Amino acid sequence: MAGPRHTNGARKRSTSAARSGGHRAAAGNGTVRAWQDDPLGYAPPPLDRPIPNLALAPLKLRIKGTKVPSGAYAPGTAQFRYWAAAEALRRGADFWAPLLGVHRWQPGAVLRVGLDEGDDLNAYYDRSELAFFHSSAGGKTVYSGESPDVVCHELGHACLDAHRPELWDAPFIEAGAFHESFGDMSAILSALQLTTVRGSALAAVKRHRSSELSRLAEQLGWAIRQTAPAAVDPDCLRNAYNPFHYVDPNTLPDSAPANRLCAEVHSFSRVFTGAFYDALSGMLRIRSSKPSAADLATVAADLGRLLVDATGAAPVVPSYFAQVAAHLIDADAARFGGKYRSALVKAFVGRKIIPQTAVDGVVAVTAETRREAAKFAAARMVRPAPRIVTFQFSAKDFGLGDRPLHVDAPIEQKPAHTLSVAITQERPHEDDGAAHASARRFVEVLFAHHRVAVEPQHGARSASPEAPHRHTHAVVAKGGALKLVRRRFDCGRG
Ligand SMILES: [Zn+2]
């Protein structure tokens, strides 16, 4: 693709409307106009939607700056972008709020949103706010906060942080990659809250194909490709329909073009998101041999429910993907009597996230065994006990001064259940020594990608070339040592 596609007639009309100055096209009528999917030309035309109330509890949001009067504005205007972002924020938060059962964000009762925090192809969540940016690429100005995919991805970080704050400090590639995957899954599940998106995506999900639903952040991906063609997929930022299988991320290289996996968290996240899209497709076919758009809505809600159950119960450990996958399968047993088990097993075994041997014999079972398994799983869907381990590395190994570098890790423990027992047997090295090695590899990759802010007094040989808001972590002084702390989940080009 050479540039943004303008094959969509509605988009061409939008551009001429934008030139007219962004005045409200209609009296408002209790609606605002917003994108149904990413603004790039794949997307269907804007939709009139009920005016979103960002102050609605429990997950309240507030866009910084002056509130724009509601109305049906023309795409290309700041007013349109304001309401497009507000609509996506409210839709995503309304999807997650009843599932999460939380009453506040990590930053507090209200999550602030900055729609244009400066010049960058980027977006982040930093436990203070969601931040979006603008930048020029290919002769066009792109606003990351205009894309419902990007907005609902960032919102996903904030939702998962409200639900599972322990992941914030987890210094493991799989924990960071899962946070990114959760953002992409949030974008897909939030998009499926729209009737029109369900209608257009139904055939692709049923037949398990790439689609405008599986392609995420097409416009931001296009903008990044203008200067780094191999850094992202050829038709989007990341695609949930992808060919990637699990390998130990500690064995992957620091960097790779988008058509290969590397140890960077956005790259590796695609393994879990791929399994999620496989599972969505398989669950839809279990629900009905001739599924309707309403069936797709039900399956999306069920999968969202299972994700919340699984992330609540899965212990934070280096092999986090397998733990979440195993708990998803158990959550299905506990909540739905194992209705979706074959689809979930096929997805996660197929992606090599959990080994075949761990699930042998657990799919084809009698009704009685299934009931017993459901009871057993339900009793174990409990939150694990936290344990904070501090790993010590030599700061010199990362180009810093001759001092210890401390990295805290929440390593959780819980009673084993059927699947986790089998997985533990498959991976007997899952102990503190392995966690130390995983944490070290995580820190190496952060430094390789210039993601760590280091003050000169801490002995950095050279300043990070990345802008301050691109740093996901910082090194701070604590006692006689240095300590690594997380600052944000940053979601632009890695
Ligand atoms: Zn992200």
Image: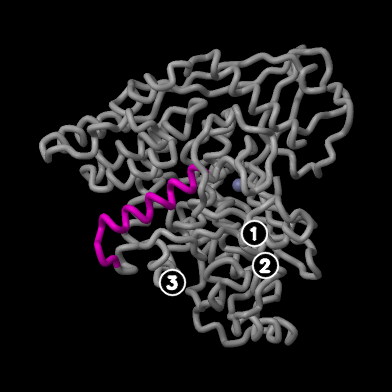
Task: Assess disc 1: are there few (<14), some (14-19) or many (≥20) residues with their C-alpha within 10 Å of its C-alpha.
Answer: some
* Quadrant containing the N terminus in the rendered view: bottom right
| Label number found at residue 234 | 1
Q: Position of residue 278 (x, y in %)?
A: 41, 51
Left/right placement of residue 231 relative to residue 167 reads right
Check if mark 1's residue and mark 2's residue have beta carbons within 8 Å. yes
Image quadrant in which you'd find residue 252: top right
Query: Is the CB–ligand 1 distance for label 3 below 8 Å?
Result: no
Q: Which residue is mark 2?
A: 1
Task: Tell me the amino acid under the disc marked 3.
Answer: Ser
> Label 1 to label 3, Cα distance in Å?
22 Å
Task: Assess disc 2: are there few (<14), some (14-19) or many (≥20) residues with their C-alpha within 10 Å of its C-alpha.
Answer: few
Q: Position of residue 312 (x, y in %)?
A: 40, 36
Q: What span is in magenta?
A: 271-291
Query: Does 354 appear in magenta?
Result: no
Q: Position of residue 372 (x, y in %)?
A: 16, 33
Left/right placement of residue 393 relative to residue 62 reads right
- The residue mark sitting in front, 1 or 3, is 1
Q: Which residue is mark 3?
A: 200
Q: Give whichever of discs 1 and 2 has the lower sequence position.
A: 2
Left/right placement of residue 113 relative to residue 207 reads right
| Label number found at residue 326 | none
- The secondary element bearing badge 3 is classed as helix
Residue at 61 percent across and 59 percent down: it is 236
Chief SS of the magenta region:
helix
Residue at 29 percent across and 65 percent down: it is 291
Residue 91 makes an appearance in the image: no
> Label 3 to label 2, Cα distance in Å?
22 Å
| Along the line of sight, the residue nearer the viewer: 327 or 33 | 327
